[in-house]
Amino acid sequence: MNQELPNTKPKEDFEVSTLIDNEHEIILYNDDVNTFEHVIECLITICSHSALQAEQCAYLVHYSGRCAVKSGSLDELVPKCSALLEEGLSAEVV
C-alpha cells in the first residue's frame, strides 16, 4: 500500500526563534567597506569565534545581508557590539 504524504513544505516566511527569555543577539550587517579578513579578525578577537565559525559568519553576512554572530545577556553583548562598531562594522543588539 503506497500512500502519498500531504505537502509538508514549510512556509518560507516562518522563522524559528531559539532564543530563551532575556537572551539577545548581536546582528552583524553587510557593508561595502570592510574586507572579509577584517570581519573575520573582529569576530575572532571580539566575539571569541573560531576561525571557521568567523569565516562562515562572514560569508552569511555577505550573501544574506546579516547574521546573528553572538547570543547572550545584554550585559555581555553591549560591550562586544560597541567594540564591533568601533572597528567600523555595522551591528546591533536585538
Image (cartoon, rainbow, N blue to C red):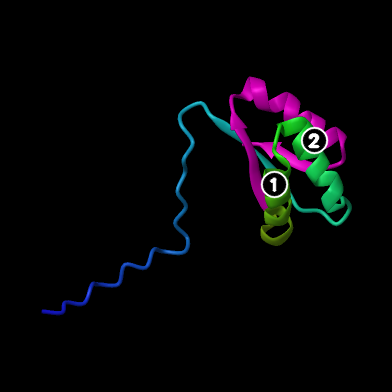
Highlighted magenta segment, given as a residue range: 66-94
Q: Residues within 10 Å of mark 2 (few under 14, many from 20)?
A: many
Residue 77 falls left or right of residue 44: left
Residue drawn where x is 47% and y is 52% of the image:
15
**Residue 10 placed where, x, y %?**
39, 63
**Residue 63 placed where, x, y %?**
70, 61
Establish if 16 lies above or below 45.
Answer: below
Residue drawn where x is 87% and y is 41% of the image:
88
Quadrant containing the N terminus in the rendered view: bottom left
Establish if 10 lies above or below 58.
Answer: below
Determine the image quadrant of residue 48.
Answer: top right
Determine the image quadrant of residue 7.
Answer: bottom left
Verify whether residue 73 appears in magenta.
yes
Verify whether residue 30 appears in magenta.
no
Q: Nearer the viewer, residue 58 or 87?
A: 58
**Residue 60 placed where, x, y %?**
67, 55
**Residue 23 placed where, x, y %?**
53, 29
Check disc 1 and give the amino acid type: Leu
SS state under label 2: helix
**Which label sits on residue 84?**
2
Residue drawn where x is 46% and y is 40% of the image:
18
Task: Indicate which disc, 2 or 1, sits on the residue closer to the N terminus.
Answer: 1
Q: Nearer the viewer, residue 22 or 55?
A: 55
Task: State the CA–CA distance, disc 2 to disc 1.
Answer: 19 Å
Check disc 2 and give the amino acid type: Leu
Quadrant containing the C terminus in the rendered view: top right
Establish if 29 lies above or below 49.
Answer: below
Disc 1: which residue: 52
Residue 33 falls left or right of residue 43: right
Q: Residue furthest top?
A: 75
Residue 21 falls left or right of residue 69: left
SS state under label 1: helix
